[in-house]
Structures are given as structure tokens and as C-alpha cells.
Image: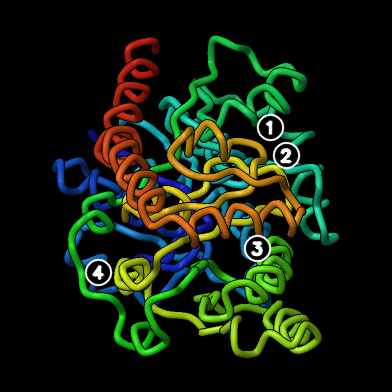
Amino acid sequence: MRVFFITHTYALGGSGGGEQFVSNFLAELRKRKHEVFVFTAGGTGFERQEKELGLQVYHCPAFGHHAFHKYEYVLLSWKAAMLAKEFTPDVIHAQNDVFPGLIGSVVKWQTKKPLVLAVEYLSEQAVSLNLKLVFALNKFFLPKVPFDAVVSWSKFVVDKFFVPWGIPGEKIHIIPGAVNVKQFAKKVKPHPKLAKLGKSLIVSAKPLHSTNAEGITYIVKAMAIVAKKHPEWKYVVVGEGQSRPALEKLVNELGLQDNVILFGALPNSEIPSVYAAAEIVAHSFAFKATTSIALMESMAAGKAIVATDSGEVKPTLGETGLLPKQKDEKSIAAALLAFIESPALRREKGLAAQKKALKEYGIESVVDKFLDVYKRVGNAK
């Protein structure tokens, strides 16, 4: 099958959840010998990986802050259509939200091929002007995109947005995000730099942009409670971003310099060893979450997981972890203490989480489901 793939989260081996999903998805398509042409905003510097995978990629010129790149590449929809006509795809896959969907609309018009639009995340609880605008544009344009199928990572987005916006139910498919579960499930040595911090580690691994950082503040506050009872335990945040200074300020204000460590970023290839060094992995979502790639990765690693109960978190994790209340440091602290004080519970939940991840969230299974959607829309033409 020949797939014309449109996305603005393209960074092979990148640290963001969307980047990781796209990297794994494209690699699996190529592993199965499908031909793929990627049309993306920016995302340069991956020539070696692209050559190894056998990907054809057009990187749109990008200017200014990366938040603007998704707006910019929509202006080059004509270029996407021209490239697609040369590539002669069987299907057009627009991945992320309405921006690639708009490009896909033009490509569909020019090539007469079916369009599958996959939406990863939508939230009306935006914290910045840019995110407010992104949500407004999705609300206005998404129902108008002439897709043959629309895929959501979560039932939450379908019920909260797709259905009220009038998107036809017969075109909606729910396919969760996915991870390279084998990469995280295999036995690896603990990361040497984290191993030096001791064995009593709680870890979060995610970029420190505004929404992630807001969630992490509640874990930091929870550590003020945990440290009083178990001062030997440390919370290590692996990731970097513009919100790091605010987190540093909070750590200093609470006097938690010995218990909370802002470690900085590591390559995504080293995250399995980060989880191997941890006893507990913590996820705190400031807003209602759809499928979390980081949550799935920590499940595949077989870790004891504390994840705040919001959006799609409970359906993803099920009974295989502890689900404290959202934005509630006391509830988060209670969950952390439950794991800290019961190694047996940590082992039990970690094994159950890994079993669920291996069964439900492998990239192979998700690619199977997308290929089925591709075939359905192709046969319907």
C-alpha cells in the first residue's frame, strides 16, 4: 500500500508523545514494505534515519517558533497536492488534528484518493492563546473536513467533541495511541546517572511544556508530604522545557532540593533505562487527558504506576495502577505512600500493567487497525 502521510509532529526518535507515535508508526509501515511519503512541517536533521527506513520526506520550510509551524505548512497545501500526484498514493493519512486534515482535503481533491484523519488530542481547557486558537480552529473546521474516516485516540474525545460537533458516527473509529512495547518491556540496566541517586526513586519522564509542568507541580507538592515520612525517597523529573524555572522555584520554596531532582532531558532511546532505575513512575495530568504515550511506555516497562484519574487515563491503566484525584497533592501522596510501603503491591501492579500494555498498546496492533481502516475506505470508493 502507498500512504501519503501528513503530520506536524515529526522528529524520528523525538521525546514528545506524538513524535514517538509517528516514529514508531512509520517504522512499522516500512517494516511491512508499505511505501510512505511524509509531508511535514520542519523536522529536519533526520536524513540518516529516513534513508535507513526508506522514507520519502518533504520538509516544509519553517520559520519562527515551532508552535507556528503547523499554521505555516497549511499554506503549502498546493505543494502537498503536487507531491501526492507524483507519488500516486492509495490512501492519505493526516495525523494530529485539523491542520493536516486541511492539507489532506486539498490532496484528496487533487488525487481523488480516500482521506483518513487521525486526531490525537483535543482540549477546551487551554492555558495559552495559541492553544485556545488551536481548539477554536479544530471546532470550526474539523466537521467540515471531507475525510472518509476519522480516528480518535480516545472515546473521551469522541463523546466530548466529535459527537456534539456533528461528525457522523459511521465515520468514527477509536484506535488508541501505541508504543514500541518490546523496547520498554525488555530487560535493561538502570540508567547509570539515576542509579547513583539510590534505589528509592519515583520518576516522571516528559517534556516540561506548560501543561505537563502544571501536572508535575502536584507531584512536587505531594513529595513535601512523602518526604516527611520517607525522606530517603527521591522524585526525579527527566525532561526539559520552558517551564523548568517555575518548577525549580517551587522546589526551592518547599525546601525539597534533596527530594526533587530536575534531571534534564535524555534521548528517547535512554528512557527504558530511566524506568529501569525507578521503583514508581508518576503521571499527573493537569487537564483531562486522552491517550498518554508516556503512560503506555511506563506500563510496558512493568513499573508501579501512579496516574491521576482524568479523561482516558483510567480506561488505559485500568486496575493495574493507582489512580489518585486530579490536582490533589494529598491524594497523590497517599498513592505514592501506598506503593512506597508495599514492595509486593509494586510488583503486583507493575506486572499487571506490563501484561495489559503488551496485549493492547503495541504499535503492531495499532498499525493492523489503521490498515484495516485504509482498506475499508479504499473499498468504499
Residue type at numbered disc 4: Gln
Residue type at numbered disc 1: Leu
Tags 4 and 1 touching, CB below 8 Å: no
Q: In this view, does 304 lie above or below 354?
A: below
N-terminal-most mark, 4 or 1: 4
Tags 1 and 3 touching, CB below 8 Å: no
Residue identified by numbered label 1: 142
Residue 249 in picture, x, y percent from top left: 77, 86
Q: Give residue 138's mark.
A: 2
Q: Residue at x 70, y 18 (%)?
A: 163
N-terminal-most mark, 1 or 3: 1
N-terminal-most mark, 3 or 4: 4
- Can I make out residue 300 in this image? yes
User: Does dot 2 land on a helix, a strand or a loop?
Assistant: helix
Q: Is residue 60 above or below residue 120?
A: below
Q: Which residue is drawn at 17% across and 65% down?
A: 52
Residue 155 in picture, x, y percent from top left: 58, 26
Q: In this view, does 187 lie to the left or right of 42?
A: left
Of badges 3 and 4, the one in the foreground is: 3
Residue 82 in picture, x, y percent from top left: 44, 47
Tags 4 and 2 touching, CB below 8 Å: no
N-terminal-most mark, 3 or 2: 2
